[in-house]
Amino acid sequence: MPAIDPSEIGTYRRLFDNKFGEIEELLADLPAAALTWKPFETSPWQGPSGALGWLIAHNISSTVYLLRRAEWQLGRIEWGDINGDEGDEEFGPANLEPAYLLDRSKRAQAWVQSFLDSLSAADLELSAAHPKNGRPLTVRYDVQHAIEHMSQHNGHAQLTRQLWALA
């Protein structure tokens, strides 16, 4: 068994791999119909639920978006170039196929790992003010926010998949 990288970036690498592994588990043996299924259409709290495919597509896209925001803080891209992995096609019709979402997830995972490979410990300290609201951002915050956001949406998707299996 290879040695575990105990560094902060090594920890982020393992956490992202775990989160992408959860997406792979969610999509395993899943029929396409499950991606558009919603456990409920209305709720007195927070409105309708999200469909499983929407949750997974948004999860992948927002992860890339947040890390591209970190790229902006590093001076690698312009603010206007920050987007998710599929831009305006985040919820396009291809995302209604489990095999496509799995491939998309694997592409995003490879991109995330490449991004993490490009970071140094000092890069995590870099910061910039959000150009619209002035809120301070750091590369570390956006990496951690991406992991937290993935965790939240994976949890939503896992519950939705469980409910679909019972429907």
Image (cartoon, helix red, strand yellow):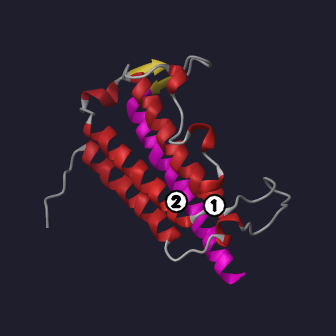
Quadrant of the rendering where the C terminus is positioned: bottom right
Which quarter of the figure has residue 43? bottom right
Name the main secondary structure of what is drawn in magenta.
Answer: helix
Q: What residue sits 40% from the left and 56% below the top?
A: 106
* Residue at the disc numbered 2: 100
**Residue 43 falls within the magenta-colored stretch:** no
Q: What residue sits 45% from the left and 66% below the top?
A: 24
Residue 120 is left or right of residue 40, and the answer is left
Which mark is drawn over residue 96? 1
Asked if labels 2 and 1 touch by Cβ distance under 8 angstroms, the answer is yes
Q: What residue sits 51% from the left and 29% below the top?
A: 82
Residue 154 horizontal/vertical position (percent)? 54, 60
Residue 59 horizontal/vertical position (percent)? 55, 51
Q: Residues within 10 Å of mark 2 (few under 14, many from 20)?
A: few
* Residue in front for this viewpoint, 124 or 99: 99
* Residue type pointed to by label 1: Leu
Relative vertical location of residue 157 with respect to residue 5 in this rendering, above or below:
below
